[in-house]
Image: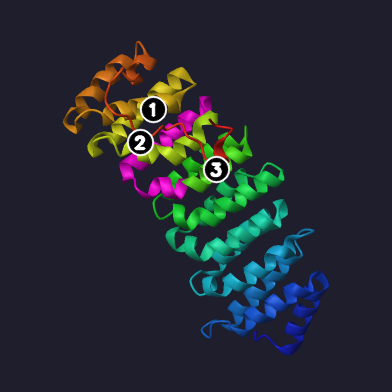
Amino acid sequence: MPLDDAYLQDAEARLAQLSPPLLDAFRDARAVLPAALTDDQQRLWVEEGLALAAHSLRSWEAGADYFRVAPALLAKMDEASFRRWVGAGRALAELAAAIAGAYFKASPDVLPRLAGPQASEWAHLGERLYKATWKSISLAGAFFTLSPLLLQRLSLSDLGRLARVLEGISDRSADLAAACLEAAPGALHSLTQNETAAFIDFAAAISDGAWPEAALYFQRGPDLLRGIEPGQRARYLELSSGVARRLGRQAYVLFAEGSLALRDVAEVHHGRLIELAEGLAGPSPAASAARPTSSSPRAASPYATSPRCTTAA
């Protein structure tokens, strides 16, 4: 059914009642609608936008972002998938319009990397970071904003594991979780696929028992790993995860000390040293990661903190 003048006037009147700026956003977006969109697709775009804007007290605030990005997605999605995508955004808008806005804005870069129901899974990951506080709203919004960068290196499954790490840290400190999230794209950029999985596993171990050290790990960990023979980095992270789960505290400190110790040794010996440390991990986790006294020059301290991380030092 074509979008006749009466239909559009009614839609605009309803939007104007909610927010004049939202009406302006609708008109601007409609002026540049892709020519390939059918009348039915345009009507779906309007109807879902109206439903979003009227869904909750402030859900209209996410409407402008929806109206801008939805037309391009409509051309690539069937009606059922499109409705599920908007429905997930409405659920986020019920929590906070800022979260829904970040979700909509990130969607054009994220959805091509996902398949079918994975879009709803992605939305749910961000939703779990919401804890009914302003800081958690900021954290959830940042998660969606950074998702395009994170998904360049992570599968949705690995992104889910990272989100659970952030959720665990945010239960203690939303600021610390935000610092970890901010550092995550840079930290993961230099890691291989195997190293990435092991890196997140160790982050999970830290978040369980040594959460104040988490931001230091995300910020300094990749640099510390560079001193380890490339083929042994994932194995060293796995060793560190086991030690962290046994000791509960000082996980990052031991990881850093061990990394610096290996940096002082020729790479050809790293595999054997890690193997010996694995043997010690059972009877004495701390001994397996301990740094021996050495006269060798040391690298810059891994415990230096940035202004964002004074809590974790």
Note whether residue 118 is visible: no
Residue 112: percent from the left, percent from the top?
44, 63
Q: Which mark is residue 24?
A: none
**Circles 3 and 2 in contact, beta carbons < 8 Å:** no
Is residue 16 positioned above or below 261 on the image?
below
As helix, strand or loop, the secondary structure at mark 2 comes to helix
Task: Name which residue lies at 31% across and 45% down.
Answer: 192
Does the magenta-highlighted stretch encompass residue 135? no
Q: Quadrant of residue 178?
A: top right
Note whether residue 34 is visible: yes
- Residue at the farthest bottom position: 5
Q: Quadrant of residue 43?
A: bottom right
Task: Name which residue lies at 49% across and 21% down.
Answer: 248
Is residue 127 positioned above or below 226 on the image?
below
As helix, strand or loop, the secondary structure at mark 3 comes to helix
Task: Name which residue lies at 61% across and 79% down.
Answer: 42
**Circles 2 and 1 in contact, beta carbons < 8 Å:** yes
Query: Residue at label 3?
Result: 179
Q: Amino acid at mark 3?
A: Ala
Q: Amino acid at mark 1?
A: Phe
Residue 186: percent from the left, percent from the top?
43, 49
- Span colored in magenta: 184-210
Query: Residue at label 1?
Result: 255
